[in-house]
Image (tube, rainbow, N blue to C red):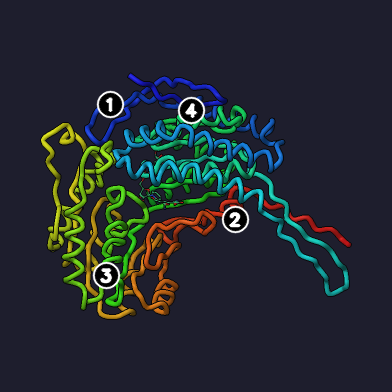
Amino acid sequence: MKLIQNYINGQFVRGRREFTDVNPADGSVIAQVTEADQSLVDDAVGSARNAFQGEWGKLGVRERAARLHKVADAIKARFDSFVRAEVADTGKPIALASRLDIPRAAANFRAFADAIKMAGLESCQTETPSGKTALNYAVRKPLGVVGIITPWNLPLLLLTWKVAPALACGNTVVVKPSEETPATATLLGEVMQEAGIPNGVYNVVHGFGPDSAGEYLTQHPDVNAVTFTGESRTGAAIMKAVAPSVKPVSFELGGKNAAIAFADCDFEETVNGISEAVFLNTGQVCLCAERVYVQRPIFDRFVDALRRKAETLRPGDPMDVNTDLGPLISAQHRDKVISYYNLARTEGATVVTGGGIPKFGSVLDDGFYIQPTIYTGLPESARCIKEEIFGPVCHVAPFDDEEQAVAMANDTKYGLAASIWTTNLKRGHRVAQSMNVGITWVNCWFLRDLRTPFGGVGLSGIGREGGTHSLNFYSELNNVCVRL
Ligand code: NAD
Ligand code: 6OD
């Protein structure tokens, strides 16, 4: 049986306890994972501190950026191994891992290597009322050791989205990937060695959250900042854990995102776009639309078209290039999603399609598959409309005018993303700007430019990452004022 180990100071290190890594497509055990206890987390943080004070901390920006490009090259060179490991851990279709997850991991390193090279200094020329003059400029300094905690839905993409800017800014990191998906973070350790990243700059500790590696890392007094992607409730627990040592945090949390389709939309483009926004990665993307609002004149036609689209999506073996839908991540997560499918019925929903578990007549029946599901007819106060489900499911509701659509979309404690579908340019801008979220797409969804601010409001997070926003989080500014 394969053993996935912690990666500390350039060495693969065994812990005292182990847990299993399960393939969600058929429930088989892929590997044993060795858990980091408090003393291994101490070792990882200590090795990151030494590396920060050693060669890495002294490297100039040009050399750091060059090595991050080498990391991207090394990911590309091992593309197939990364894809296979990600597919086995998550059950996501190989076509998706090959076009999204692994290319984005390499792109993250290139984008932040280039961003740090291009970053200028903030400066201003000062004149005081009494006639003194000065030059102010702010120099960028790394924070030190950054703790990075990530979820299972886009494991390598989301991990490297934080590792790349943290290293670009000159920090060292200890990462705690999700217990469900430990493989690619570990493989990245090998890549770091090949790319000439010094030992201790990138460390991986495996385990769970409470009373395990996650909590040990966030509470650690020698960790200078914590960046986290995951559930809003976990974010709240981490906030408590970091409070005594007043660490800066960046939180990318859950969502209950709305898609709004106006009657003047390009109908086919909108059905295809919203279908992707609901069902990509079996609905396990924080940006997925679980609430769809459609203007009344096209409501019935839209619901029927979305149903037909959902019914053409092929669930199946994630290694088959024709598979559209993989399983959910775990039996436990499927139980949660099924409990919402049942709740929707008790709350009065009409099931347009789905609502159950598909049957394959093969080993896939031991996997954690679920049908793509569409509901209508729920009141906006229903729990299924208010709570994040994180599965291949949406509720479609009609609206009459722009004002009502905006009010319905904004009636949530979350505020991550929205998509607006219309051919009226002015309306597109107007509605997009009135969304109470961090990211709004018009006539598209999950179209990314890594320089743009990314994050959420309310329960969806604290802070923004992306481009200079990431550079600002992963560095401290020291303003120098020189009297002229
Ligand atoms: P999760 O919060 O359960 O776990 C995320 C990570 O936190 C895991 O590594 C886990 O081990 C760790 N963890 C759990 N409890 C902890 C604790 N007390 N202290 C320290 N670490 C702890 O989330 P998940 O189920 O892995 O991921 C799904 C969630 O993530 C969804 O809510 C989704 O919306 C959200 N998400 C948000 C974004 C975003 O960019 N906003 C991106 C992806 C996923
Ligand atoms: O594209 C990104 O940078 C990003 N952080 C995506 C998050 C997706 C959530 O599941």
The CA span between labels 2 and 3 is 37 Å
Q: Write the residue at 53% across / 49% down.
A: 249
Q: Kindly identify the amino acid type of the residue bearing the numbered disc 1.
A: Val
Local SS, label 1: strand
Q: Is residue 165 above or below residue 200?
A: below
Query: In 3D space, how far apart are the residues under numbered discs 2 and 1 (Cα atoms)?
Result: 41 Å
> Where is mark 1, residue-wise?
29
Residue 459's x, y, as percent?
40, 58
Q: Quadrant of residue 306?
A: bottom left
Percent of width and height locating residue 156: 43, 40
The kind of residue on which mark 3 rests is Phe
Q: Position of residue 390 (x, y in %)?
A: 29, 51
Q: Earlier in the sequence, mark 3 or mark 1?
A: 1
C-alpha gap between disc 3 and disc 1 = 44 Å
Quick one: 222 or 82, which is closer to the camera?
82
Q: Amino acid at mark 2?
A: Thr
State yes or no: Cβ of the residue under disc 1 lies below 8 Å from any atom of ligand 1: no
User: Dot 3 corresponds to which residue?
Assistant: 267
Vertically, is 462 above or below 168?
below
Q: Which residue is mark 2?
A: 468
Mark 4 → mark 1, Cα distance in angstroms? 26 Å
Whether residues under marks 2 and 3 lie with C-beta atoms below 8 angstroms apart, the answer is no
Q: Which residue is mark 4?
A: 38
Q: Residue at x 24, y 36 (%)?
A: 25
Q: Amino acid at mark 4?
A: Gln
